[in-house]
Image: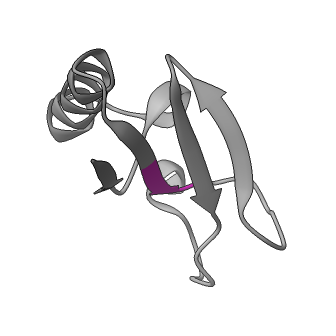
């Protein structure tokens, strides 16, 4: 089955809680044989979707056109 996991932060840019659950769930679905893609935001300026492979799944990141990203809220 092809599965899309959508989360506000993922991987090295995550803060904890919900992001950790999304990562654990995505990795478990891959372990069970599913094709998993994660869609997340990034604080880095990217003009298009940035794609990376992580633990057997595809991670797509985009920069939302907002005045600031959640990682810059401190």
- For the point 53% across and 64% down, the residue is 69
In the rendered view, does 19 fall on the left or right side of 74? left
> How is the rendered protein coloured?
one colour
Range shown magenta? 38-42
Count up the numbered dots: 0
Residue 2 in view of the camera: yes
- For the point 79% across and 62% down, the residue is 45
**Front residue (pair 12, 61):** 61
Looking at the image, the residue that sits furthest to the right is 47
The reply to whether the magenta stretch includes residue 63 is no
Percent coordinates x, y for residue 44 in the rendering: 73, 53
In the rendered view, does 18 fall on the left or right side of 60? left
Magenta stretch: helix, strand or loop mostly: strand
In the rendered view, does 70 fall on the left or right side of 62? left
- For the point 21% across and 20% down, the residue is 32
Percent coordinates x, y for residue 18 in the rendering: 16, 40
- For the point 50% across and 16% down, the residue is 55
**Front residue (pair 1, 59):** 1
**Front residue (pair 63, 30):** 30
Residue 74 in view of the camera: no
Percent coordinates x, y for residue 11 in the rendering: 48, 29
**Front residue (pair 70, 14):** 14
């Amino acid at each position: 089955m092809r599965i899309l996991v959508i989360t506000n932060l993922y991987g090295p840019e995550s803060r904890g809680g919900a992001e950790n659950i999304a990562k654990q769930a995505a990795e478990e679905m891959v372990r069970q044989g599913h094709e998993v893609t994660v869609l997340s935001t990034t604080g880095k300026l990217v003009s298009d979707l940035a794609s990376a492979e992580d633990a057997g799944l595809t991670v797509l990141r985009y920069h939302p056109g907002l005045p600031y990203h959640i990682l810059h809220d401190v």
